[in-house]
Image (spheres, grey):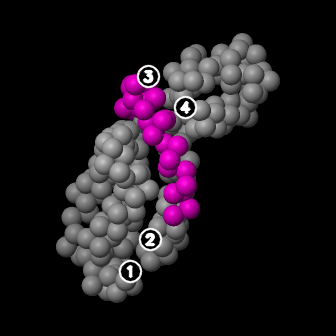
Amino acid sequence: MSDDQKSAIIKKAGEMFFRLGIRSVSIDDICRELGISKKTFYVYFASKEELVAQLLHSNVVYISGKMEELLKMKDFRKLVARFIKHQEAEKNDVRRVPQLVYDLKKYYPRQFADFQQECFRAQKEYIRAYLELGQQEGLVRANLNIELTATLFAKIHSDAVRDLEQIEAHGHNMHQLSHTAMDIFVRGVLSEEGMKLYK
């Protein structure tokens, strides 16, 4: 078995799911796009459900890698600036997310629930690490309950993804939500010195 071929299947499936929705893309469609047989597909994945689960896991691994890179800067100011810039760069992609979330919730609820839990745990850990770094630099309030704050913010984001349809029904999108939540979060955790820099 080749890890490269498995990765190629996951990548191609992700591209197609993102563009067309998960439900409308079959295993046959993915195999045809890659020029492989279904027999080859089943060497790596027992079912489409397993492919979806591994695709979602690889997404968490990818995002976690990006978060690790940010933490390596060891500079809270640069870290926050880079995080905000990253959000701005991604804003044109969020209009395609609702279809994916809808398909996951309706047709792959177990995989979506597992994905939500994995995202929540990862986000909580990275937020906690960011806040601890900020406290060390005197830019995050010394009296902040880091564990509770990290849990709260990760939960807000997790619930927002799950309830994206409700957010859109009120005329908002994921980018607006992320931007607003980030601003409230940053303002709520910063020390006076941190607020001067943020402003």
Residue at the image point whose x is 44% and y is 71% from the top: 80
Circle 2 sits on which residue?
A: 80
* Separation (CA) of disc 1 from disc 4: 38 Å
In-image side of 6 versus 146 (left or right): right
Q: Could you tell which of marks 3 and 2 lies nearer the N-terminus?
A: 2
Main SS of residues in magenta: helix
The answer, for residue 97, to whether it is visible in the render is yes
- Type of residue at label 4? Gly
Residue 97 painted magenta: yes
Where is 5 relative to 132, above or below? above
Circle 4 sits on which residue?
A: 21
Crowdedness of circle 3 by 10 Å Cα count: few (<14), some, many (20+)?
some
44 vs 35, nearest the viewer? 35
Q: Which mark is residue 107?
A: 3
- Type of residue at label 3? Tyr
Circle 1 sits on which residue?
A: 198
